[in-house]
Image (cartoon, grey):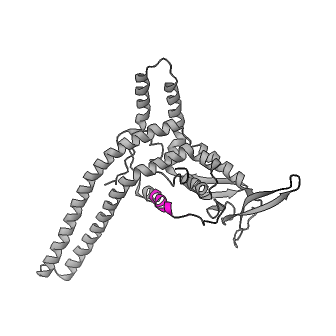
Amino acid sequence: MFANPFYAGLIPHNGELFKGSHKRMITIKEFNYAQKLLGDRARPRIGSKSEHPYGSIIFCGECGCQVVAKTTTKLIKRTGKLKTYVHYYCTRKSLVRPCNQRKYTTIEQLEADIDAELEKYTIIPEFREMALDILRRVNELEVKDRTSVYKEQQKSRNDIQAQLDELVDMRARNLLNDDEYLSSRNRLKLELAGMDEDLRHTESRAEKHLELTEKVFDLATYGRIWLRESKDPKVKRDILLGLGENFILKDNKLTLTPHTWLIPLESDYPELLREYEQVRTNKKASAKEIAEAMNEIMSRWRTRRDLNPRHPA
C-alpha cells in the first residue's frame, strides 16, 4: 500500500457526499479524469533517475513559466560534513512577461504547504474503515444494478444493429434511394457508436469505482504520513497530484486548486467527527446505543445512491 498509495478518488462534491437529500451522480468528465490517473498507475510519471518529485508540474505565479529544481551539495565547515539542498525556482523563460521571482524555494517550504493542504482533508482511520465498509456494501448493490443497466443498454444496441441490417436489406431491394439510405445509415451508426460508449462506461465505472474511492480515503487518512516519511519521489509527486491541479508558486508560496471530490472532506467532515467523538466517548451509552448512533451518523455516507458511479442513463 505505502509504496504506491493512490492516484485519485471518485467522490461527489459540493458538500453532497454527506447530504442525502442531494443525490448527485459523478460526471463523465470527473470519472474519466480519475480513471486516467488510475490507469497511468504502472507508468512512471517521472524518470527513474529523477530526484525532484515536483519538477515540471508547478508553474510560476508571475510569468507562467515552468518551475524546476536543482540539487546542490555544500561542505559545512563547522561540522566538516556535506549537506544537500534542493531548491525550486522559475526558469524565467518568458519573452513577453518579465519575472521578478528570483528567490529559490526549498523543498521543505513546498512540502510544508502541501502538508497544510493535506491537513484540510485528513480523517481518522476509524472513520475511513466505517466509510469503506459502507462503500463496499453499496458497491455490491451497484454490481447488481449495473447488470440490469447493462442488459438494457445491450438490448438497445441490438435493436440499432437490427435496424442497420434491415436498412441494408431495404437498399438491396431498391426500397430506398442512395440519399435516404446514406442519411439513415449515418444516423444509426452515430447512435450505435454512442451506445457502445455507454456500454464501456457501464462496465468500467462499476469495476473501478470502489478502488478509486478507496484511494481517496487512503490519501485523506495517510497522506500526511506518506509525505513526511516516504523517500520515494514518485510517491511524493503522486500525493501532490492526488490533491489537485493548477500548481502555482509565487513568493515562495505554493497554491493549488483541490480536486472537487476532496472538498466535502474539508467542509463537512469536522462536524461529523465531532458527532462521532461525542458518541464514542459516551460512557453511559450501551454498546447497542453506540452502534445505532454511529449508524445514524454514517447514514449520510450511504444514503441510497449518492456514491453510485453508474452511467447517468
Residue 276 at x, y = what percent? Answer: 50, 30
Q: Main secondary structure of the magenta part?
A: helix
Q: Judge left or right: residue 252 versus residue 310.
A: right
Q: In this view, does 255 lie above or below 186?
A: above
Q: Is residue 35 magenta?
A: yes
- What residue is drawn where x is 52% and y is 42%? 265
Q: Is residue 18 above or below residue 87?
A: above
| Residue 22 visible at all | no
Q: How many marks?
A: 0
Q: Is residue 286 magenta?
A: no
- What residue is drawn where x is 17% and y is 73%? 165
Depth check: 19 or 130 in front? Answer: 130
Span colored in magenta: 34-44
Instruction: Name the image quarter holding the C terminus.
Output: bottom left
Q: Judge left or right: residue 142 versus residue 62.
A: left
Where is residue 77, by image quadrant? bottom right
Where is residue 287, by image quadrant? top left
Residue 185 at x, y = what percent? Answer: 23, 74
Residue 300 at x, y = what percent? Answer: 42, 36
Instruction: Find the residue positioned furthest to the right.
Output: 78
Q: Is residue 297 above or below residue 215?
A: above
